[in-house]
Image (cartoon, helix red, strand yellow):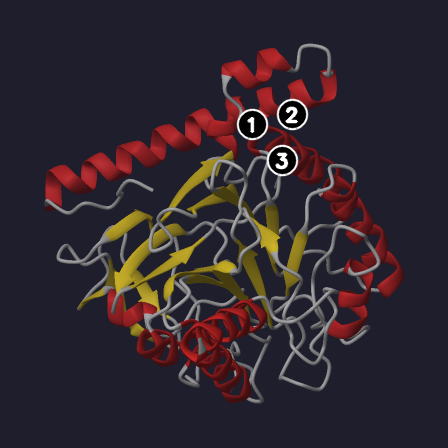
Amino acid sequence: MKKTLKAVLSLLLCVVIATGMVLFAAAEDSLTTAPLYFGEDGRFKILHITDTHLHEDNVGDSTRLIALACDAEQPDLVILTGDLAMEDTLDRTAERTDQLMQVFESRNIPVAVTFGNHDSENGAYTREEVMALYNSYACSISIDDGDALTGCGTYLVPVSSRDGDGTSFNLWLFDSGDYDNEGHYANVAEDQVEWYKEKSAAAEEACGGKIYSLVFQHIIVPEIYDALEETGRKTLFSYPRIYDESKYYRFSPDGTNYGMLHEMPCPGYYNHGQFDALAQRGDVLAMFTGHDHTNAFGVKYRGIDIVNSLSTRYNGDAFSTQYGYRVIELNENAPDKYETRVVRWYDFANAKEIKALANRREDKDLLSEIRFQGFFQKLFNDFSVIFTKIFTGRTARYPD
């Protein structure tokens, strides 16, 4: 009887800790949102949107594309990882934020936000003020961690089983900062790393096993350069190392690679041990970042996929084949795996989508323009990849 009671109490404790003991998203003491749930089919779909860089000239077309993406993908959660709407005043930023958030609010899609290096860099407002803008919408589940941790927007989003019987998966969001005191890009700070380690270990101890998870933040980790191959000189599809442009890096042919590198990865200058902590804990399958706008790639390093998602905006005639969004899908029946794919605006603007918008002239015209511009960009890009393969034997583009 005592053993049975003890087992029941242990199970209850596991459920309580794993779900964060919260009823509301803005629970500053736990920094854990109320749980989301896997669907009846055991699936959970995330739309990763980053680096929208909304301003007066692009906000209309960008939010129109994001709305079309939401309608096509029907996500269970949207995660925004920074550099979103950065006008010169808080009032103007609020206008751009409203244009973005109305897309999700009108569709009842939960939104989790964390920030990038540009979101408050002009000094006209703080990250906390911007977070308050997002949290003024009912669809936002974001948390302002207040004085608890460095930055604003480091918290945990648990995904509960479809029957509500405890957490099946975790989504960690980190504010990766903006710049350090020397003007370099910042990175996740020591106290945020310790918070993750303690929270992760407590859940594992209570539940008797790891809860698999994904990480989302703006700035990629410095270990990206350990996962790539250094080359002594500039070659096709190799890029200089930030802070040391005498070194060049490209995909390692011996590694597990996804997608394509289009520019140098830009991590923070100093390393505060975040990736080491993730690798040691062993519960994180992948970390998803933005920041480097045309990079849509991934590399596996020490058991973790380091993945970059491309900028989700419309930027006139530039990079319609390199801007878009990423989809991540989880399966409750296989929590140690995930699926992901990249959708570029050029691919999204296919004949089927254009035809479906026959009665929505503005959307149809936008997709037709993207298709026309992207044809030439894709042609040049494909030629470069094939040329590299023929004349160097190297693979520059892998399946996403």
The disc placed on residue 370 is 1
Q: Nearer the viewer, mark 3 or mark 2?
A: 3
Q: Name the N-terminal-most of marks 1 and 3.
A: 3
Q: Observer-nearest residue: 33 or 113?
A: 33
Which of the 4 image quadrants contains residue 230? bottom left
| Residue located at (62% from left, 58% from top) | 35
Instruction: Specify few, some or many for label 2: CA neighbours under 10 Å numbering under 14, 14-19, or 20 or more.
Output: some
| Residue located at (49% from left, 29% from top) | 346
Which x, y percent locates residue 2? 45, 79
Which x, y percent locates residue 70? 63, 35
| Residue located at (24% from left, 46% from top) | 396
Which x, y percent locates residue 219? 50, 68
| Residue located at (51% from left, 52% from top) | 161
Report, in whole angstroms, how far the alpha carbon at label 3 lies from the one at label 2.
16 Å
Q: Which residue, given by chain and number where applicable, does mark 2 sit on? A: 366
Say left or right for 356 vs 204: right
Q: Are marks 1 and 3 in contact (CB under 8 Å)?
A: no
Kind of element beneath mark 3:
helix
Q: Name the N-terminal-most of marks 3 and 2.
A: 3
The disc placed on residue 219 is none
* Relative height, residue 236 to residue 178 (above, below): above
Kind of element beneath mark 1:
helix
Q: Which residue, given by chain and number where applicable, does mark 3 sit on? A: 70
Please name the amino acid that badge 2 sits on: Leu
Instruction: Specify few, some or many for label 3: CA neighbours under 10 Å numbering under 14, 14-19, or 20 or more.
Output: some
Q: Are marks 1 and 2 in contact (CB under 8 Å)?
A: yes
Which x, y percent locates residue 62? 67, 39
- Which image quadrant: the C terminus? top left
Q: Are marks 3 and 2 in contact (CB under 8 Å)?
A: no
- Which image quadrant: the N terminus? bottom left
Please name the amino acid that badge 1 sits on: Ile
Please name the amino acid that badge 3 sits on: Cys
